[in-house]
Image (cartoon, helix red, strand yellow):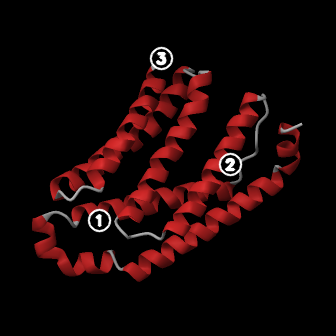
């Protein structure tokens, strides 16, 4: 259990902690959930950096690291469904696409094969992360009594439901399209996985 794998395990353990805090009715716990998510996200970057720098690459890590990433981001998306910020159908499409592609990649790695990852898929991941962090920051800081009392008009703009809906719709469509492109480009390899 090298350090990168320990960090991956920590990220998995922090995910339900984040969810519990975020969907609680306690403003203080909701604000703490932002810190928990940031720590979990930092472990994602740091364990990858450690693994590459010191060649701490294990079979367990190759399997669990991308899975832990998807679990964390998927949990964040569903957390916003739970508080009626995001539409369930959009989140289901995004999460299903990401878990499907991640599952195919892991299955291919297990068979000593590899998928080609497009730049569009990388842009998709970055756009999802930016959007999640944006939502987390504005919706958790809105729970701060001091900020809410002094910046209520700004929070009203930043949490505008129509804007959030449109952005999430664009992310959903983009995620879906990149998934279709990904599967189409790797269709021969995917067919070979199940023969």
Mark 2 Cα within 10 Å, few/some/many (few <14, many 20+)?
A: some
Query: Which residue appears at 57% of the width and 73% of the height?
Result: 170
The residue where tag 1 is placed is 139
The residue where tag 3 is placed is 1
Quadrant position of residue 103: top right
Quadrant position of residue 42: top left
Q: Earlier in the sequence, mark 1 or mark 2?
A: 2
Q: Which percent across, then down, holds residue 26?
A: 17, 56
Cα gap from disc 1 to disc 2, whole angstroms: 30 Å
Q: Which percent across, then down, holds residue 12?
A: 43, 36
Q: Nearer the viewer, residue 68 or 124?
A: 68
The residue where tag 2 is placed is 101
Quadrant for the C terminus in the image: top right
Query: Which residue appears at 43% of the width and 24% of the height?
Result: 6
Callout 1–callout 2 Cβ contact below 8 Å: no
Query: Which residue appears at 42% of the width and 64% of the height?
Result: 81
Cα gap from disc 2 to disc 3, whole angstroms: 26 Å
Q: Earlier in the sequence, mark 2 or mark 3?
A: 3
Q: Which percent across, then down, holds residue 47?
A: 47, 31
Residue 64 visible in the displayed image: yes
Q: Secondary structure at mark 2?
A: helix
Q: Earlier in the sequence, mark 1 or mark 3?
A: 3
Extreme residue toward the top, this view: 1
Mark 1 Cα within 10 Å, few/some/many (few <14, many 20+)?
A: many
Quadrant position of residue 94: bottom right
Cα gap from disc 1 to disc 3, whole angstroms: 36 Å
């Amino acid at each position: 259990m090298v350090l990168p794998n320990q960090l991956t395990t920590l990220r998995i353990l922090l995910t339900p902690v984040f969810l519990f805090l975020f969907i609680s009715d306690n403003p203080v716990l909701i604000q703490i959930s932002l810190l928990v998510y940031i720590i979990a996200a930092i472990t994602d970057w740091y364990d990858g950096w450690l693994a590459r720098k010191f060649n701490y690459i294990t079979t367990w890590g190759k399997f669990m690291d991308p899975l832990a990433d998807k679990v964390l981001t998927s949990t964040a998306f569903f957390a916003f469904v739970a508080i009626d910020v995001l539409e369930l159908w959009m989140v289901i499409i995004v999460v299903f696409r990401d878990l499907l592609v991640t599952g195919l990649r892991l299955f291919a790695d297990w068979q000593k094969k590899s998928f080609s990852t497009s730049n569009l898929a990388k842009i998709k991941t970055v756009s999802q992360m930016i959007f999640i962090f944006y939502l987390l920051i504005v919706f958790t800081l809105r729970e701060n009594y001091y900020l809410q009392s002094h910046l209520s008009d700004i929070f009203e703009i930043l949490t505008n439901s129509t804007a959030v809906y449109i952005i999430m719709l664009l992310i959903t469509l983009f995620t879906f399209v990149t998934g279709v492109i990904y599967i189409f480009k790797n269709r021969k390899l995917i067919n070979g996985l199940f023969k």
